[in-house]
């Protein structure tokens, strides 16, 4: 069983690549999560988890991460990804992610709407949010990615 994460950060990045996989890998690197093995998780930030923007995690580590991404091979297309963490006063948080064809404003707006709904259906009060958003105009093959990695 994995321990409950105690630290996290919010990040986003975008990049081009020569293939869809290298575009994804380059976006991971741009978002500062490219040297870890991401374990994709759903939407709950553990109680008491602290924001740590300079989090140091050894390369190759298995890192629980909520993320959204989009890959496009259509030159000129605008793609975006956003992730948001909603915080309650003294309980757990909620993470929402969204990726789309469109602007970073489009992606951020969708994440904010989803956070409000997630808190409403849980009967919790949304006290604060932290977002990371990126957009990218595709040259050949590109990826936009937003992530919330969590660590122990």
Image (spheres, helix red, strand yellow):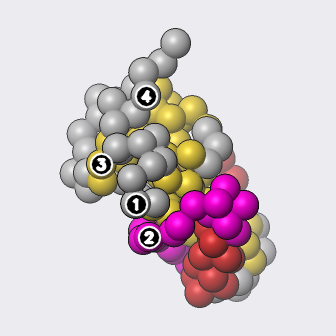
Above or below: residue 151 compared with residue 138: above
In the rendering, which numbered label is found on residue 45? none
Q: Which residue is mark 3?
A: 50
Q: Earlier in the sequence, mark 1 or mark 4?
A: 4
Range of residues picked out in magenta: 117-138
Who comes first in sequence, dot 2 or dot 4?
Answer: 4
- Assess whether mark 1 and mark 2 are in contact (beta carbons under 8 angstroms): yes
- Number of numbered discs visible in the structure rendering: 4
Q: Is residue 12 left or right of residue 50?
A: right
For discs 2 and 4, the disc positioned in front in the rendered view: 2
* Lateral position of residue 49 relative to residue 141, left or right: left
**Which comes sooner in the sequence, label 4 or label 3?**
4
Q: CA distance from mark 2 to mark 1?
A: 6 Å
Where is residue 47, by image quadrant? top left
Give the residue number, with chain letter if any, for mark 4: 4
* Left or right of 118 on screen, residue 132: left
* Contact? badges 4 and 3 (CB < 8 Å): no
In the picture, residue 121 is in which quadrant? Answer: bottom right
Disc 2 designates what residue?
Answer: 127
Distance Cα–Cα, label 3 vs label 1: 13 Å
**Cα distance between the residues tagged 4 and 3:** 12 Å
Q: Which residue is mark 1?
A: 89
Q: Earlier in the sequence, mark 3 or mark 1?
A: 3
Q: Give the label, 2 or 3, closer to the camera.
A: 2
Q: Residues within 10 Å of mark 4 (few under 14, many from 20)?
A: some
């Amino acid at each position: 069983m994995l321990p409950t994460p105690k630290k996290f950060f919010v990040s986003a990045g975008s990049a081009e690549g020569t293939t869809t996989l290298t575009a994804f890998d380059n976006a991971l690197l741009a978002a500062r999560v490219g040297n870890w093995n991401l374990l994709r998780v759903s939407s709950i930030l553990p109680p008491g988890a602290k924001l740590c923007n300079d989090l140091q995690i050894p390369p190759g580590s298995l890192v629980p991460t909520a993320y959204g991404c989009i890959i496009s091979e259509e030159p000129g297309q605008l793609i975006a990804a956003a992730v948001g963490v909603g915080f309650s006063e003294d309980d757990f948080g909620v993470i929402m992610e969204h990726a789309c064809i469109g602007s970073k404003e489009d992606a951020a707006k969708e994440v904010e709407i989803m956070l409000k709904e997630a808190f409403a259906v849980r009967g919790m009060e949304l006290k604060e949010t932290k977002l990371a958003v990126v957009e990218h105009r595709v040259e050949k093959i590109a990826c936009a990615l937003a992530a919330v990695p969590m660590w122990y």
